[in-house]
Amino acid sequence: MILFASLNQNKEKKMTNENGWGEYSRLVLKELETLATGIESLRTELQEVKQEMIKMQVREDTVKDIKVWKDKIDEVASPSQLKDALKEIEDLKLFKTKAVTIFAVIQFAMAAIVFAMKFI
């Protein structure tokens, strides 16, 4: 009888161990599935980050191109030099207008003097 009880206890321990292993294996499988889902989510996020990095690289290349263009323009003339040149052009236009007006007035006066000399 003692032998039979001992066998029953061993059998119960095996069942308990098997039942415990079954629960543990299900728990492990559930955790593995959760980890797999998390890894897949991370892969998706990584792809999105890569796409954003590509967009940023394109923007950076565009900024570099604009900087190179600006440097080339600055070699020709700086913005302050362009502003001064435009002011000088405006001053020259005003001077031209004044000079043409004065020349016309002097020509009219000379013509009037020549016309008056014919009658004197």
Image (tube, rainbow, N blue to C red):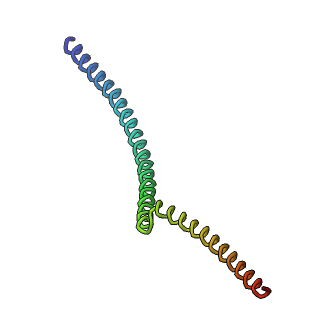
- How many numbered marks does the figure carry? 0
2 shown above or below 73: above
Residue 56, position in %: x, y? 43, 53
* Residue 60, picture quadrant: bottom left
Q: Which quadrant, please, contains the N terminus?
A: top left
Task: Residue at the far front: name it.
Answer: 120
Task: Residue at the far right: name it.
Answer: 119
Q: Residue at x 53, y 66 (%)?
A: 88
Q: Which quadrant, please, contains the C terminus?
A: bottom right
Q: Residue at x 31, y 24 (%)?
A: 20
Q: Nearer the viewer, residue 24 or 7?
A: 24
Residue 113, position in %: x, y? 73, 81
Q: Nearer the viewer, residue 103 or 50?
A: 103
Q: Residue at x 61, y 67 (%)?
A: 94
Q: Residue at x 41, y 64 (%)?
A: 71
* Residue 103, picture quadrant: bottom right
User: In the picture provided, is 20 more to the left or to the right than 72?
Assistant: left
Q: Nearer the viewer, residue 26 or 57?
A: 57
* Residue 86, picture quadrant: bottom right
Task: Residue at the far top: name it.
Answer: 1
Residue 57, position in %: x, y? 41, 56
Task: Residue at the far bottom: name it.
Answer: 118
Q: Nearer the viewer, residue 24 or 79?
A: 79
Residue 29, position in %: x, y? 36, 34
